Image (spheres, rainbow, N blue to C red):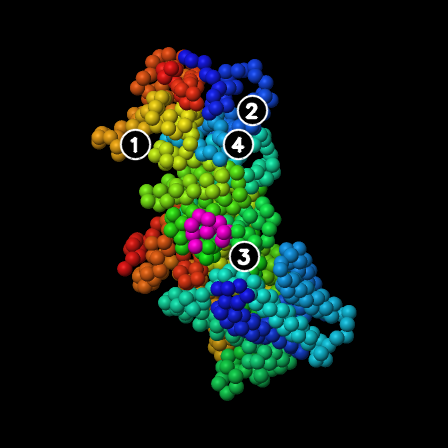
Amino acid sequence: MSAGQIPARLRRWILIWTPLIWLVLELVLFPKNRPLSSGFAHVMGGFVDPRVASYPAWTIALACVVLAAAAVAELRARRKSPRRALTLLAMAAVAALWALVQMGFSQFDLTGRSGGYSWLFQTVLLICAAVLVWIWGLDNPERADLFVWNTREMWRIYRASWQGVLGLGILVFFCGMALLAPFLVNHAWLSPDAEVSATAFAPPSLHHYLLWFGSDEQGLSVFAEFVWSSRISLFVGLLATVITTVVGAGAGIFTGYYGGWFGEIGMRVTDVFLVIPWLPFAMVLAAAWGQNYAIIVLIIAFTSWAGTARLVRAQVLSVKELAFVERARAIGSSDLHIMRKHILPNVMPLVFANAVLTVAIAVFSETTLSFLGLGDPLNFSWGTMLEHVFDTGATEVPTATAYLVAPGVAVVLVVLAFNLVGTALDEVIDPKLRKREESRSRSDEGAGERLLPLAGGGGGTVEGVVEAPSGAVWTGPAPELAPGQEGSGP
Amino acid sequence: MTAVQTGDLAPASVAAKTKPGAPAKEAAARIAHEGILDVRDLKAYFKLREGDVKAVDGVSFSLESGRSLGLAGESGCGKTTAALAILKLLPENGRIVSGEVLFDGRNLAKRTEFGMSKIRWKEVSIIFQGAMNALNPVQQVGRQIAEPIVLHEGVSEQKAMARARELFDLVGINPKRVTEFPHEMSGGMRQRAMIAMALACNPKLVIGDEPTTALDVMVQAQILELIERLRHELALSFILISHDLSVMAETCDKGVIMYAGKVVEAGTTTDIFTAPSHPYTRQLIKAFPNIHETREMVSSIAGDPPNLLEPPPGCRFYPRCALGEPACIESDQEMVAVSPGHYARCWKVA
């Protein structure tokens, strides 16, 4: 592929993913000129004064600083053309303007609604990001070609597992519900004076969609609560997972790589977090820090990073003994460089597989905390709904069965789905877990070289994975072939 | 026992030992003039709970610019430790106890880690043992080769990648393959890539630590040929570490045979193979099948190498030596000249 030509796959990716991400962002930020708000804006708003919270100004200011720093780094790299640096500078400028507007330095308001301009900044920034990726693809066509996963190939392997497809289906259903909540049910139906039935605990009825799951103790629509709850439940789960994974993987890599007294102290701290029973700990934290979803996210991350850290550390300990790490050190690479370029890519599949399972745990934790009354009293999540069911004695009311069952089943399904997807992804990542037919059909792509038993790869779980241009997936330091897979030739 | 006269190929320690009063400055000047690398009485120990493992115990050899030197011996004799000590890449529990590593007149043994990072790769580089493990499985080979170029020459990644392409061409791999991952290459190709990596910053001296050990004989021959070609094209000095005497015979001008952390024989490879003088070398050569002579059983050397935690007194080969006499344990053996430029650590050869 000659330089100056963007690989078709990356182009397709940008063209498909940019509008998709745009849609998701816009849906999350969908303006809710309603007394109660939820979704990203409000969750993040937990950190700051609710009056300035849509996207809180400090997050945007932080993004601006990061973008500016990236632009400076680009400029210092002195590339042939400064277009990357210029794009980054433009993004930083947009973010700066947005932050200023958010902080109330201007009366700039396109729609007349408070916070109504965020969609515009968001869109501009997203387009800039897409342009940036495009430029990067133009500059490094070969790397770009490798960087982009071969989605078709991955999907081909993934869909072989019916559990994975089932899990993905459930997730698509609930994520779709969460994103489209503003269109499915008006948020106004959640306000305390928006009764849909004259009596408490009206039975489910098919006459009106608001009555599908009946009504709650105040006569409010259970269906409306159910739909809007999915936003909080999923969002808290995902955000907590992101923080857990970043903190846990970071801690695992640092303590594993440095070892010695630093690693020992780090691991003892991790041990402390592991042995504290998480539920009492989380309850104490919730009592101390207050009740809103930003804090619930932090609590979940705070109590669950240690498991990820330990797992990652174990893998790092085996990866760092491999010869290429020694080679990198001999060359003179700095520790940070080795961790970023050599260790991280080799533990990434493990981190990724672990993250998917962590989402399930985080969703479950959020439900537990909310059920115990430690959730955000101003918002609905499935856990909050269950708490209401329990508190109001709806478990004893036959007509309120749906009120109890709907959130309970939803939590179970989402947790199950994440576990199914996690297992199926393991299979995509780790060829050893794949079915026999899979390896036979791919034997013509140099089967002998795909699975190399290298020394040192401990654990035997998912390890270094590469998405080759041909789509061949290979585990890095893989231990022996699984029995029955020796000689993957025809 | 003949007193040793310093010859052209004399290991430096010989000079130092026989002329204890000689001013060090004069010796250093002489060595800087004649050799690119001069290892003198190098001792590198590993610290264990039980004590120090004397893996390299007073090794000396020298190498002239543009020449090649083979370091041979059985497993565990300290070849690799000696190579790693030259570059100060010993594992955490290893350290250089004493001795000098004079590279271009500069003593590497005394350098700090920061000082070494200026030397490594830019002036001395190493081809690591086992190319399969020395390449990161999840990074493109070209980018791994570009890594030292970016680090040491401060050029942009694009330029480094362009250089990686040139290097691929130089070692006989299609330059287009720089974007491939290690698992997409064959064993020989990976070894070539490792050689390319060693050449990345135009070093003066390359140390090959068993560069052909994991390869089959055909590929081994190709790689040796490649090293030979590159050595002449780029005027490299080369140290080959191998347990395979035939590889050493094929590639090297000079040979150093090590046993239990000490040099037992040193000389030109021709000398070592035509007139092996130390009993160990003789046995070692016998342990390889000879295709030119009538078939005879390949003989192994009875016994095990000594425990380097507490090496035996006197000659370290004595317990396994067929010619051993009680006199061998009485004192440490000195290097003895067999012929000009050919030395053996055995009093019986004289």
Q: CA distance from mark 3 to mark 2?
A: 60 Å
SS assignment for the magenta stretch, majority = helix
> Which residue is found at the position 51% from the left and 19% from the top?
B15
Residue A264's image quarter? top right
Mark 1: secondary structure: loop
Q: Are marks 2 and 1 on the same chain?
A: yes
Label 3 Cα crowd, 10 Å radius (few <14 / some 14-19 / many 20+): many
Residue at 32 percent of width and 42 percent of height: B217
Q: CA distance from mark 4 to mark 3?
A: 51 Å
Residue farthest to the left, as pictured: B295
Circle 1 crowding by C-alpha within 10 Å: few under 14, some 14–19, many from 20: some
Residue B165 belongs to magenta span: yes
- In space, the residues marked 1 and 4 are separated at their CA atoms by 32 Å
Q: Secondary structure at mark 3?
A: helix
Could you tell me which chain the residue with mark 3 belongs to? A
Locate residue A462, reporting x and y percent. 43, 55
Point out residue A138 in the picture as x, y percentages from the top left corner: 55, 65
Around disc 4, counting alpha carbons within 10 Å, would you say few (fewer than 14), some (14 to 19), or many (20 or more)? many
Q: Chain under label 4?
A: B
Mark 2 or mark 1, which is nearer to you? 2
Tag 3 residue: A245
Label 2 marks a residue whose chain is B
Q: Position of residue A315 (x, y in %)?
A: 47, 49
Spatial CA distance of label 2 from label 1 is 38 Å
* Camera sees residue B217: yes
Amino acid type at image mark 2: Arg
- Which residue has dot 2 on it? B30
The stretch of residues the image draws in magenta is B164-174
In what element is the residue under mark 2?
A: helix
Label disc, if present, on residue B288 of the rendered structure: 1
Circle 4 residue: B36
